Image (cartoon, helix red, strand yellow):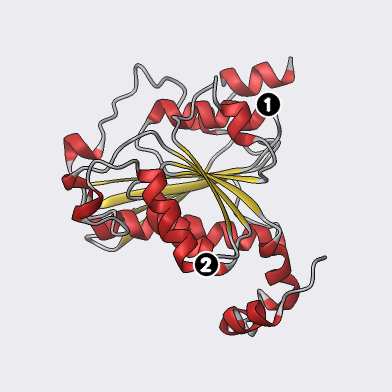
Amino acid sequence: MAELTDSQLRRYARQLIVPQVDLEGQQRLHTARVLIVGAGGLGVPMAQYLAGAGVGFIRIADDDRIELSNLPRQVAYTEADVGRLKVDVLAERLRAGNAEVTVDARAVRFDTDSGSDLLDTVTLVLDATDSLQARQDIDRTTRQVELPWIMGSAVRTSGQWAAFDSRRRLGCYHCLMSDPIGAQHASCAELGIVGPIVALVSLQQALWAIKYFVDDSLPWAQLHIMDAWSGERTQLALSVRPDCPLCQSAES
C-alpha cells in the first residue's frame, strides 16, 4: 500500500485520527477509484467531499450545461459559469481544492452504450442523476461487471438512498423499480426541490463511499427514506424479487 507524503499527512490530519479511518484507511482512500454519474445537485457536494477526503481518482460523467436555475442547490457553480459544461467547471473546482486528486471529466450521458467505458478501472459507482432510466442503466451495467453502486434521489423535501453490492445478493434496483416507463416518476424540475435536501442525500452517499473504501462494509439493499421537513425517516429491507428481469437474467 502506497505511503502518504508529509503533505498528505498534514492535509488529512483530522481524518487520520478518527479510529474508523486511521492511516490504513486513508491509504485506501488514496488508491480508491470512483465514478460519479451526474454533476448536479447530488453530484456537486459528493464530489467535493470525496475529493476533500482524499479519494485518489474521481471520474464524473454529465453532458448538461449550467443554468441559472441550478445555482440554488449546485453551489460549486456561479453566475459566471452559466452555459458552461458542468463537468468542466466541477473538475476545475475539485482540482483547485486538492491538486493530488485525479479528476476525469467526461461530457457524456451514462447509458448502456457509454457505460462500459465509463466503468473502466473504477471500483464504486455513485448515482447522482435525476433519471429513473439512468439508474436502471447503472444497475444493469454495474451488475454485468460486478461493481457495487450507491443510488440517491431527492425531490421537494424528501430523499432516499440505497447501496447495492456487486453480486446483488440481496436484490437490485430493478427489484425495487422494474418499469421505468410505466412507473410514476417526475423530476425535481417538475415537482420542485429545496437545495439542502439534495445535499443531505448526497452527503450520505459520500459518507457511505468513504466507509466502503475504508472497510468494505455497507448496509446493502436497504432503502433509506427521509422527509427532511418533518424529520421522519424510514428504512426498508429489499429482497430479490422472483420476477425481477435483471436477477432472473443473471441466473440464466
Total numbered labels: 2
Is disc 2 placed on a helix, strand or loop? loop
Which class describes the residues within 10 Å of circle 1: few (<14), some (14-19), or many (20+)?
A: some
Q: Position of residue 210 (x, y in %)?
A: 59, 62
Q: Determine which quarter of the picture holds residue 22.
A: bottom right
- Residue 161 placement (x, y as % from top left): 45, 48
Residue 62: quarter of image: top left
Left or right relative to 101: residue 130: left
Residue neighbourhood size for the residue with mark 2, other residues' Cα within 10 Å, grouped as few (<14), some (14–19), many (≥20):
some
5, above or below 135, in the image: below
**As drawn, is 86 to the left or to the right of 218?**
left
Q: Residue at x 41, y 49 (%)?
A: 43
Q: Is there a contact, CB below 8 Å, between mark 2 and mark 1? A: no
Q: Is 251 situated above or below 132?
A: above
Q: Nearer the viewer, mark 2 or mark 1?
A: 2
Q: Which residue is mark 2?
A: 98
Residue 160 in the image: x percent, y percent?
A: 39, 48
Q: Where the N terminus falls, by quadrant?
A: bottom right
The reply to whether residue 234 is visible in this rendering is: no
Please name whichever residue, 117 or 193, is drawn nearer the observer in this view of the structure. Answer: 117
Numbered badge on residue 9: none
| Residue named by callout 1 | 144
- Residue drawn at x 70%, y 41% is 121
Q: Residue at x 62, y 35 (%)?
A: 119
Decide: is 54 above or below 236: below
> Could you tell me the amino acid type at mark 2?
Asn
- From this viewpoint, which residue is outermost toward the right? 1
Q: Is residue 190 left or right of residue 13?
A: left
User: Quarter-wise, where is residue 107 in the image?
Assistant: top left
* Residue at point 71%, 59% (across, down): 31
Mark 2–mark 1 Cα distance, whole angstroms, equals 33 Å
For residue 3, side relative to residue 116 (left or right): right
